[in-house]
């Protein structure tokens, strides 16, 4: 049996995993990344529209800062987020953009002078400042007060992962491609690495590490219709759950994106609406202002998706052979804008729908998009219950998104959490007491156990079909655990998913070819995915309120008095349901106490502590004009950040004293534009 | 619509000593808007669970599913079956190491290429103060760098390349495009002399025979013809210095 030893084992080669491996490596620790696919093909790549960071370079971002970003994020989360973590995040996001700029990301830049943009369906002239010329530009996104989303055309995730994956190569970090972690190695209190299957040869091996990090992204493929890549099956979540020790937080919080193309579910960025695109119905009527007069198409995603489904229920959908949909209209943005800033959108419309979005409206309907829930961690990214297990990015419940994530905050979270958690992992590895001392006999036993499970699937003579079970699970999740949820549907879903889980224990394979064996992969994954699906459905059934993306038609109000708490799920081996417990959020510490989000439903039930805390917050605000002093008085958080990441962020309006830092020397590249004239 | 399509896929599992390369035909019903992603997934789910292929994003942005489709390298996920005719022949990309059936290991080759050409910004250890305002960049230049940065490393250009067929160490259009991309980027402090060390030979830009199939098959329509010509001209200038 092969055992690979390293300091840090990173499971997942997307932006979060890459960035935290770089962080650990720079502190002198060996890191190995395991990835199902070559790192640059991770789902991070699919982030189109951009990453939120309060740089405030564009004129419509003027006055933006960490405080505004903080409030937008907490409101977006419907007060489900951990406010300490949101503070750490918003302060680090500008640093992340600037680091990536230095690493080569071709961020779109501000051009000084007049330009025409589309706001609320109208052409509007805005004038960019001279001093902003050439700085990183921002576009508008839903649920934000300022234009804050930094972007590289509409291939932001692509450009980011190019730079970060190449940075990892520059730092000589090995990426072991086509490797899948099947189980975590642990003794009930301490995690020591993972049992790993080679997806090309089928061989098992063990990776033993001081620190193990799960950065495997989301679990969109629990659903039939999702924007997620086919590899986003939540296996990272599942192996944490299967320890019986680590917990998953808020798995019922699932985001549905308003504008994937219909019926394929391929994402069209929120940038379409941020840049001025409109949603229209069967009569080509723009309906969002009827529902959301303040934010219209740019309310948060949970709200827009619900309004769209509500409108379809009213009979205003467009009927097609695959079902009903609505229209996204970006024709008013003009050809030049679409060919420069929305070119992936053009490609997708062209190749998958055979239409030209500069001239035609595009069929769209909400689909599963993002997993807010994940491996529960503290602010350091470490599991509070399984020492040495870390998690970052979409796989984690860190928890900065609560019950709804804002557009542009996920790809931002990947790199920001990578920076922060990477430092904490390095701290962990620095401590001599944290060496990974585990007998090889125990490792051998765990590998043998996984081997036996796979052998049982291949040779056990079971009669159930893995693909059929998976397809049925996905149907149930989309039909009954979707945008609108009811107790009755959820009960039926939980019931049938439990039966599917039982059936999945007698899956048999039709093929037993050596090597990769894709059928075996489907089989062992669906067993794990069903446990996650049950965490989502059972958590949703138990949560008798509506919050963010979790909407119960039979309990339409947000209920802070009873439900201002985080769901935590664990799994006991042999059970057919997770064990749920709850972690209360402390209103008395909140910098932004619960209230109305500024869009969506206005009625909610207050927490008993809200009024007192609000009065306290108002008092501090009234007597503390300086925003930094005010913030420190309300929710001191800076001590939580790793030391190298502390400190303020410079802006055009908030210049640091003293001269600007020296610019890097120009290198003569013989006129970079020469090829144009040649 | 009840059209039938027939997919003729090259089958070979190197992990199985009994396996011999052969073509296998699958017949299935064409549905509205069917792509090769949908068709191949259906084959695996219903007809043959052992068929190996790679899809990740299924949206034409990740480059995983490049294969030879009716004789031409392309992305399977965004190929509509109605655009190919009822008989579709699929083979794995040549040149790259075969994993099985339609699946090849482009990742290992791309990593090797990146290490060899050092495809990252070299800024001489510039000490960054992340709190300070970023260095400005000309907006048009940023767009041009993005244009070349759109490469998805799918391997189509190498699979279609005449030079790569003859020399295994050729960096391919993907590699030369990366040199063009970093050469354009003022944040990369390398000079033409440095780039010459990387691609100034027959394994680099002078190996290109200008057949330019790379340009024709690139799924992202990268301006490969123009970029290779430009890099060659700059490298020639260094060679004669």
Image: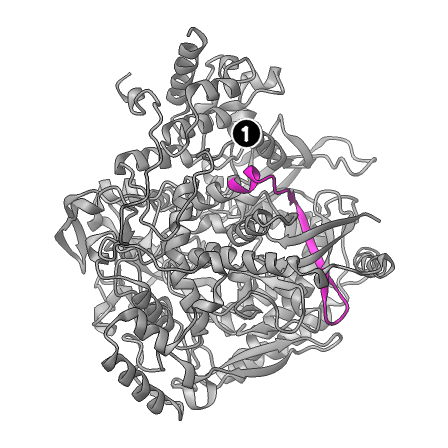
Residue at (63%, 20%) from the top-left corner? B168
Q: Secondary structure at mark 1?
A: loop
- Residue A608 pos. (x, y %): 40, 93
**Furthest-right residue in this view:** A441
- The range drawn in magenta is A167-192
Check the residue under mark 1 and report the chain it is in.
B
User: What's the residue at 65%, 52% (across, down)?
Assistant: B46
Locate residue B181, reporting x and y percent. Answer: 41, 30
- The front one of B159 and A630 is A630
Residue closest to the far bottom: A608
Q: Is residue A317 magenta?
A: no
Residue at x 66%, y 62% (from the top left corner)? A526
Task: Please say whether residue A169 is one of the residues in the magenta stretch.
Answer: yes
Choose top left, top right, bottom left or bottom right for residue A595.
Answer: bottom left
The quarter of the displayed image where residue A623 is located: bottom left
In the picture of the structure, the residue carrying the numbered disc 1 is: B70
Instruction: Examine the rendered structure and indicate whether residue A456 appears above or below residue A336.
Output: below
Q: Residues within 10 Å of mark 1 (few under 14, many from 20)?
A: some
Question: Is residue B84 in view?
Answer: yes
**Relative vertical location of residue B157 with respect to residue A365 in this rendering, above or below:** above
């Amino acid at each position: 049996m092969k055992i690979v030893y390293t300091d840090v084992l990173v499971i997942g080669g997307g932006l979060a995993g890459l960035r935290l491996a770089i962080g650990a490596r720079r502190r002198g620790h060996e890191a190995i990344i395991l990835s199902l696919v070559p790192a640059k093909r991770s789902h991070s790549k699919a982030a189109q529209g951009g990453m939120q960071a309060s740089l405030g370079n564009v004129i419509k971002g003027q006055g933006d800062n960490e405080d505004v970003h903080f409030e937008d994020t907490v409101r977006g989360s419907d007060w489900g987020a951990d406010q300490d973590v949101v503070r750490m995040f918003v302060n680090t996001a500008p640093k992340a953009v600037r680091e990536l700029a230095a690493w080569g990301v071709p961020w779109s830049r501000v051009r000084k002078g007049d330009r025409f943009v589309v706001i609320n369906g109208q052409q509007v002239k805005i004038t960019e400042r001279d001093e902003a010329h050439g700085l990183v530009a921002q576009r508008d996104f839903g649920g934000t007060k300022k234009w804050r989303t930094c972007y590289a055309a509409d291939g932001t995730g692509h450009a980011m992962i190019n730079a970060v994956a190449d940075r990892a190569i520059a730092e000589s970090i090995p990426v072991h491609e086509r490797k899948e972690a099947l189980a975590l190695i642990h003794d009930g209190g301490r995690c020591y690495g993972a049992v790993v299957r080679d997806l090309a040869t089928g061989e098992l091996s063990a990776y033993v590490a001081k620190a193990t990090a799960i950065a495997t992204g989301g679990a969109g493929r629990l659903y039939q219709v999702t924007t997620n890549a086919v590899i986003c099956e939540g296996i990272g979540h599942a192996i944490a759950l299967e320890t019986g020790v680590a917990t998953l937080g808020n798995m019922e919080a699932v985001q549905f994106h308003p504008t994937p193309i219909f019926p394929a579910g391929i994402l069209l960025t929120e940038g379409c609406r941020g840049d001025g695109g409109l949603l229209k119905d069967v009569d080509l009527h723009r309906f969002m202002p009827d529902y959301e007069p303040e934010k219209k198409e740019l309310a948060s995603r949970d709200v827009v998706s619900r309004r769209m489904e509500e409108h379809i229920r009213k009979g205003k959908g467009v009927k097609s052979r695959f079902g009903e949909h609505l229209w996204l209209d970006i024709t008013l943005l003009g050809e030049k804008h679409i060919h420069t800033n929305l070119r992936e959108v053009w490609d997708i419309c062209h190749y998958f729908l055979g239409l030209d979005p500069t001239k035609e409206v595009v069929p769209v309907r909400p689909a599963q998009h993002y997993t807010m829930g994940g491996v529960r961690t503290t602010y350091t990214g470490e599991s509070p219950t399984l020492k040495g297990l870390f998690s970052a990015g979409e796989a984690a419940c860190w928890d900065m998104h609560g019950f709804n994530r804002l557009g542009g905050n996920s790809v931002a979270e990947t790199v920001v959490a990578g920076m922060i958690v990477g430092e904490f992992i390095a701290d962990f590895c620095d401590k001599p007491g944290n060496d990974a001392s585990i007998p090889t006999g125990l490792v051998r036993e765990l590998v043998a156990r996984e081997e036996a499970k796979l052998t049982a699937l291949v040779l056990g003579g079971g009669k159930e079909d893995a693909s059929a079970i998976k397809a049925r699970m996905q149907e149930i999740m989309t039909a009954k655990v979707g945008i609108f949820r009811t107790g009755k549907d959820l009960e039926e879903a939980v019931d049938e998913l439990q039966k599917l889980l039982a059936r999945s224990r007698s899956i048999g394979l039709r093929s037993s070819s050596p090597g990769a064996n894709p059928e075996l992969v489907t089989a062992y994954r669906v067993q794990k995915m069903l446990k996650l699906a049950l965490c989502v459905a059972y958590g949703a059934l138990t949560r008798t309120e509506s919050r963010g993306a979790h909407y119960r038609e039979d309990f339409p109000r947000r209920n802070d008095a009873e439900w201002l708490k985080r769901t935590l799920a664990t799994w006991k081996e042999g059970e057919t349901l997770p064990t749920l417990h709850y972690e209360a959020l402390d209103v008395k510490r909140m910098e932004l106490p619960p209230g109305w989000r500024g869009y969506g439903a206005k009625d909610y039930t207050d927490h008993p502590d809200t009024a007192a805390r609000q009065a306290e917050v108002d008092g501090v605000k009234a007597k503390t004009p300086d925003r930094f002093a005010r913030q420190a008085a309300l929710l001191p958080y800076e001590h939580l950040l790793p030391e190298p990441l502390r400190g303020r962020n410079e802006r055009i309006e908030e210049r640091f004293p003293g001269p600007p830092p020296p610019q890097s020397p120009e290198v003569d590249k013989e006129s970079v534009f020469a090829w144009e004239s040649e | 619509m009840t059209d039938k399509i027939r997919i003729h896929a090259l089958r070979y599992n190197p992990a199985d000593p009994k396996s011999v390369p052969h073509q296998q035909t699958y017949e299935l019903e064409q549905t509205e808007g069917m792509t090769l992603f949908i068709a191949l997934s259906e084959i695996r789910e219903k007809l043959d669970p052992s068929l190996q292929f790679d899809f990740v994003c299924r949206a034409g942005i990740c480059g995983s599913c490049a294969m030879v489709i009716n004789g031409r390298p392309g992305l399977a996920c965004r190929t509509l079956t109605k655009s190919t005719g009822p008989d579709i022949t699929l083979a794995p990309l040549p040149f790259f190491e075969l994993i099985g059936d339609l699946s090849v290991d482009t990742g290992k080759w791309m990593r090797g290429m990146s290490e060899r050409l050092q495809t990252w910004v070299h800024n001489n250890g510039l000490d960054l103060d992340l709190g300070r305002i970023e260095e400005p960049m000309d907006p048009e230049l940023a767009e041009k760098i993005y244009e070349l940065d759109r490469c998805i490393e799918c391997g189509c250009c190498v699979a279609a390349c005449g030079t790569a067929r003859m020399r295994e160490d050729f960096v391919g259009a993907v590699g030369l495009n990366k040199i063009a991309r970093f050469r354009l980027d003022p944040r990369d402090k390398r000079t033409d002399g440095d780039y010459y060390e990387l691609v100034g030979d027959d394994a680099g830009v002078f190996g290109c025979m200008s057949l330019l199939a790379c340009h024709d098959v690139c799924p992202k329509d990268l301006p490969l013809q123009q970029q290779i010509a430009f890099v060659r001209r700059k490298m020639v200038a260094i060679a004669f210095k």
